[in-house]
Amino acid sequence: MRIGQLAQLVGVETQTIRFYEQQGLLPPPDRQDNGYRVYTEKHVEGLAFIRRCRILGLSLAEIHELQSYQDDPHQPCTAVNALLDDHISHVRSQITALQALEKQLVSLRASCNDDREVEACGVLAGISEGNMHQQ
Amino acid sequence: MRIGQLAQLVGVETQTIRFYEQQGLLPPPDRQDNGYRVYTEKHVEGLAFIRRCRILGLSLAEIHELQSYQDDPHQPCTAVNALLDDHISHVRSQITALQALEKQLVSLRASCNDDREVEACGVLAGISEGNMHQQ
DNA sequence: ATTGACCTTATAGTAGCTTTATAGTTTAAA
DNA sequence: TTTAAACTATAAAGCTACTATAAGGTCAAT
Ligand SMILES: [Zn+2]
Ligand SMILES: [Zn+2]
Ligand SMILES: [Zn+2]
Ligand SMILES: [Zn+2]
């Protein structure tokens, strides 16, 4: 199977596949005489795994870490679970931060209606005055 | 006032100030004979404005847009308010996406306790099986 | 013979800085 | 006075996870 077929199968662009190979996330496949990459079912699974991790918001570094655990199948899986716990807390703190931000933005927005000149815009005034509660 | 003082005053690194100048967000200051930048109170306000916008999650492009409105103080402020409305909806959709992600991650995490081998890890199995509901 | 679809590598661009390298200037201590 | 610390300057690379472009080689069909 060549790169285009793999790309279509998993739903990724060919450049992305080469990029993952270059980053050490996907093992370098064999080559045809003309230099074309030849992929196997293992690669399909590997690439699909990477993509599912990305959908879950894991970084390439975190994926790399997971792969290293997979290479050692008889270790206890505490590290895997811990990685996910860490990632969940990343996500939760992002949510918290964004919710605080939303609140701030909404209150800023409430300080202006649409019938003013820029000079008197409540939004711009709110930003300029800087009585913002940070974090 | 030189760049280091400005940086300390606003709480930014000097490189960041040069970067904003290069990006056209901060007007180029006068220079001393030795080439050192000399800043005024205007620059302090301008830099503080940029930083507050950044804290609100506005992109440099959005900040640039806001600045262009400030240059035209007698226009109606509808565009300013619209920019903020757009940004609020950006933030809201990010929150929604992250909340869906969190749910997915938590249920994945629940599929494993810490007493297994990597081989039997519920988390890795969950990712590999790929019965994930996307988006 | 030439089109078109596919493949190759290398390079640059995206956002918003941060880091590094290299060098010149000012200020304070020894 | 010499010297070292602290400050300034520019330019370029690094960060993340790709995406896009360029310039070219390969292959099947027309
Ligand atoms: Zn994470
Ligand atoms: Zn307004
Ligand atoms: Zn925005
Ligand atoms: Zn586990």
Image: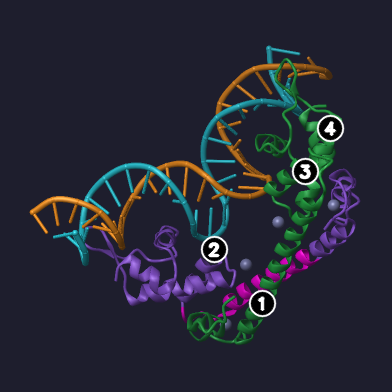
Chain colours: A green, B purple, C cyan, D orange
Residue at the (78%, 46%) spot, across then down? A51
Quarter of the image where one finds residue B10: bottom left
Q: Nearer the viewer, mark 2 or mark 1?
A: 1
Decide which of tag 1 and tag 3 comes sooner along the chain. 3
Label 4 close to label 2 by CB (< 8 Å): no
Q: Nearer the viewer, mark 1 or mark 4?
A: 4
Q: For ligand 2, which image quadrant applies?
A: bottom right
SS at mark 3 in the image: helix
Q: Determine if the C-beta at disc 2 is less than 8 A from ligand 3.
A: no
**Label annotation for residue B61:** 2
| Magenta extent | B73-99
Tell me residue A58's x, y (percent): 73, 53
Q: Which of marks 4 and 2 is in front?
A: 4
**Label annotation for residue A69:** 3
Decide which of tag 1 and tag 4 comes sooner along the chain. 4
Quarter of the image where one finds residue B31: bottom left
Measured Cα–Cα span from mark 2 to mark 1: 22 Å
Location of residue A112 with respect to A82 vertically, above or below = below
Tell me residue A77's x, y (percent): 82, 49
Residue type of the residue flagged with mark 2: Ala
SS at mark 1 in the image: helix
Location of residue A57 with respect to A35 vertically, above or below = below
Location of residue A43 with respect to C26 vertically, above or below = above
Residue type of the residue flagged with mark 1: Ala
Q: Mark 1 points at which residue?
A: A100
Decide which of tag 3 and tag 4 comes sooner along the chain. 4
Q: Decide whether residue A115 is among the magenta residues.
A: no
Chain letter for mark 4: A
Q: Nearer the viewer, mark 3 or mark 4?
A: 3
Q: Considering the image in quadrants, where does the N terminus of chain A appear? A: top right
